Image: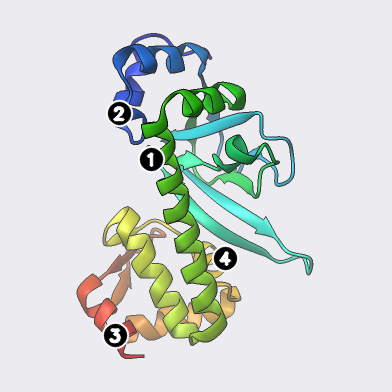
Amino acid sequence: MRMTGAEAQFFASIPPFDILSPEERAKVGAVSVEKHFRKGETIFEEGLPARTVWIVKEGRVHLEKTHSNGTVSTLCVMTGGELLCCLPALDRGGYPATAIAKEPTTLIGIPSDSFSRLMADTPALSARIVSTLCKCLRGVEERARSQAYDSAEKRVGNVLLMMAKKFGPEIPLTREDFAALSGLTVETTIRMTSRLKEHKLLSSNGKGTLKLDITRLRAHIDSL
């Protein structure tokens, strides 16, 4: 569905597009489309040509990587206002991961060519986008280092704290989600979350949401 001028104001509320002039945002809105995805629907697949840069308007998207041994890990969890894999707009490569809608999700799509031209014409926007990419890559690198050297309990704890930065103290992710983010089996993840519950560092509401005591959890993880 093509965006209207009113819907283009969406860009005024989210970084990095908030630095654009009203005229520039209107141009972006004119070439953008809004698309809805059902829970579990694939938005794009790893390796396919990246013809669109997607922004999450509503919902939640996981970027997943399939490894040579068949296991799947979650690289990033993206929510409202966040860009999905804008890297291909810079290097003209394919999508580096597969994107899955984990709940009913609405995305705004910008053609990659239009996005690249916008970056070339707006140095300040380019700098903001590169900064966003660096932040994402730094998070992935920190998780990779944790998976290589930390205990299972610390790996799960670090993922919980990372997700708390995005969702706050109540995190709506499943144990399978945490396993994919931690690089652990579901069984090990369950054992580690149970251990943290025994320490009264988190609790479950029975509806798939974990509630954290962030301050005490951070202190506990730092002590491991």
Colour scheme of the rendered structure: rainbow
- Decide which of 70, 132 is in the foreground and name it: 132
Please tell me whether residue 139 is drawn above or below residue 157 in the rendered image: above
Residue 19's label in the rendered image is 2
Of labels 2 and 1, earlier in sequence is: 2
Is residue 140 visible in the rendered image? The answer is yes
**Does residue 85 appear left or right of residue 45 in this picture?**
left
Query: Among all residues in the image, which is located at the extreme bottom?
Result: 224
Residue sitting at x 38%, y 37%: 81
Residue 220's label in the rendered image is 3
The label nearer to you, 3 versus 2, is: 2
Q: Amino acid at mark 2?
A: Ile
Q: Amino acid at mark 4?
A: Ala
- Spatial CA distance of label 3 from label 2 is 40 Å
Q: Where is residue 113 shown, x and y percent of the image?
A: 61, 23
Q: Where is residue 195 shown, x and y percent of the image?
A: 39, 86
Q: Are marks 2 and 1 in contact (CB under 8 Å)?
A: yes
Of labels 3 and 4, earlier in sequence is: 4
* Residue with the mark numbered 1: 128
